[in-house]
Image: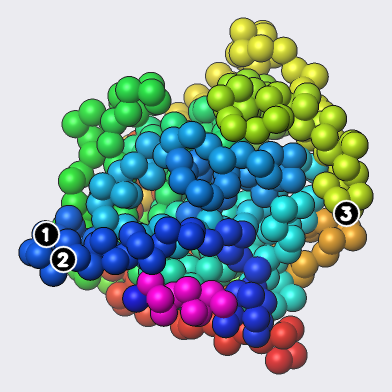
């Protein structure tokens, strides 16, 4: 199976459509697969991930022959000394790490004019459904690769939208867990309050398998302490085709009118929820979030500087600080910044430490307001989840002007709250897929998996990509 995936990566990612989703292959992949085969032959099976080929995002550290770079030339020399906590769990489970996926450089936290899915080390990744479309970010490579079946399952990371958005536009199931369900130790950070890794897969079942395998407390990540007693050993037990029966679902009112094609898909999705036994209640979550304004960005600037400096101080790279990254990019501008610059890095480097009043005020706003809003809406209406389209349709790749607004994003509330979020394929328009999101309160992964699985089984919207050149074919 590993040999077949490596051949497919060569045929589709490096040749043919040239998706450019894999930034580096693991030279040990076949030897790991061989070892897992021998274990299986001898009667030892570690679990459902035994021998399963997986791709991981290139901001997740591995203590092997692969680099960990967040797509940045500045730390292209970083051969990290040890595995990230979740990679240790993957290896214990018997997974075969095929390689690492390309991403939006620094997880799309380099410039306000950036192009998602582009990095100075990896170049531009394409959407497998329509090749001139952007697979979204920052977990673009994981989204494109999993969608095109270059691996059995993939892992992405999210601060705000970077699992669910590429999952949506690449026709995948994506789960952004509650912050603290999975450890972040060994992952190049943006935000200690919002960051998490999570599954990006072709089915809810695969996502549930991976979610449970890597959920665990980690003494090096204090946020995981809150997961004590709240982790399900096996999330597949919540896969219920009748999971919508008798449930109450809040529909975000502002999402009913995005654009004509999206509106049709969302209304059909709402109708499906009702037809499968759910009661629909209109809610207005976004209205409650207006006081947040620009506070989230301020929080990310402070936390990025703090977290990245800590990571780089232990990295196996000549670059040891955010200031060093900025200096490297200036000295190597033609290669490192050919399309957009690094004003976000520079803004972050100007910030003080995490004791700054500006930071403390901003982080209080960005965590408390969305948590209170989500919890209040759920409680007041006796809801099991809130739904909306995950985001708009995939943008065109535009390295000159950068990303543009595609009309809608539902990632923010759950991202800032640190709450769980699942996206399920909702259908197609213009041959482009888009997802339906379910969000709920902390550690309610079981609830949204149950709802998402029932919707997935009722609709079966996902189809394999055809690698169309553009909208016209």
Q: Which mark is residue 44?
A: 1
Q: Which stretch did the figure color magenta?
A: 2-10
Single out the mark in the foreground, 1 or 3. 1
Q: Is residue 271 left or right of residue 393?
A: left
- Tell me residue 311's x, y (percent): 57, 27
Circles 2 and 1 in contact, beta carbons < 8 Å: yes
Q: 430 above or below 335? A: below
- Sequence-first tag of 3 and 2: 2
Image-quadrant location for residue 52: bottom left
Q: Residue at x 75, y 18 (%)?
A: 351
Q: Which mark is residue 362?
A: none
Residue on which disc 3 sits: 339
- Tell me residue 316's x, y (percent): 59, 32
Residue on which disc 2 sits: 40
Residue closest to the eye, 42 or 183: 42
Q: Residue at x 32, y 22 (%)?
A: 219
Circles 3 and 2 in contact, beta carbons < 8 Å: no
Q: How is the image coloured?
A: rainbow
At label 1, counting other C-alpha atoms closer than 10 Å, the crowd grade (few under 14, some 14-19, many 20 or more) is few
What is the spatial separation of the Cα atoms under label 3 and label 2, in whole angstroms? 49 Å
């Amino acid at each position: 199976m590993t040999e077949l995936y490596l051949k497919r990566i060569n045929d589709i990612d490096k040749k043919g459509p040239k998706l450019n989703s894999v930034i580096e292959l693991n030279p040990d992949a076949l030897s790991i697969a061989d070892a897992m085969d021998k274990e299986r032959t001898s009667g030892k099976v570690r679990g459902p991930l035994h021998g399963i080929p997986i791709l991981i995002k290139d901001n997740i550290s591995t203590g092997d022959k692969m680099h960990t770079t967040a797509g940045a030339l500045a730390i292209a020399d970083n051969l990290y000394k040890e595995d990230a906590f979740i990679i240790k769990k993957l290896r214990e489970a018997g997974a075969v790490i095929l390689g690492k996926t390309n991403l939006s450089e620094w997880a799309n936290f380099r410039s306000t004019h950036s192009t998602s899915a582009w990095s100075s080390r990896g170049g531009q990744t394409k959407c497998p459904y329509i090749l001139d479309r952007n697979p979204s970010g920052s977990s673009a490579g994981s989204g494109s690769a999993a969608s095109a079946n270059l691996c059995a399952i993939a892992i992405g990371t999210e601060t705000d939208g970077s699992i669910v958005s590429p999952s949506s536009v690449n026709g995948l199931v994506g789960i952004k867990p509650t912050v603290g369900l999975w450890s972040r130790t060994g992952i190049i950070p943006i935000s200690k309050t919002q960051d998490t890794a999570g599954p990006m897969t072709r089915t809810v079942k695969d996502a549930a398998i991976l979610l449970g395998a890597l959920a665990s407390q980690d003494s090096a990540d204090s946020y995981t302490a809150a997961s004590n007693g709240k982790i399900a050993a096996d999330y597949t037990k919540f896969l219920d085709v009748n999971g919508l029966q008798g449930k109450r679902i809040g529909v975000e009112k502002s999402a009913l009118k995005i654009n004509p094609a999206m509106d049709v898909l969302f209304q059909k999705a709402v109708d499906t929820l009702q037809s499968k036994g759910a009661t629909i209640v209109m809610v207005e979550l976004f209205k409650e979030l207006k006081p947040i304004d620009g506070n989230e960005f301020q929080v990310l600037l402070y936390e990025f500087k703090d977290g990245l400096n800590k990571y780089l101080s232990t990295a196996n790279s000549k670059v040891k600080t955010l200031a060093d990254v900025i200096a490297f990019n200036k000295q190597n501008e033609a290669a490192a910044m050919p399309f957009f610059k690094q004003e976000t890095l520079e803004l972050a480097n100007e910030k003080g430490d995490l004791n700054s009043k500006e930071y403390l005020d901003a982080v209080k706003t960005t965590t408390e307001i969305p948590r209170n809003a989500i919890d209040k809406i759920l409680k007041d209406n006796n809801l099991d989840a809130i739904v909306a389209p995950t985001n708009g349709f995939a943008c065109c790749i535009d390295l000159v002007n950068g990303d543009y607004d595609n009309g809608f994003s539902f990632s923010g509330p759950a991202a800032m709250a640190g709450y769980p979020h699942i996206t399920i394929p909702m259908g197609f328009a213009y041959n482009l897929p888009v997802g339906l999101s379910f969000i709920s309160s902390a550690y309610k992964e079981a609830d949204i998996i149950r709802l998402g699985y029932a919707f997935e089984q009722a609709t079966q919207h996902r189809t394999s990509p055809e690698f169309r050149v553009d909208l016209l074919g």
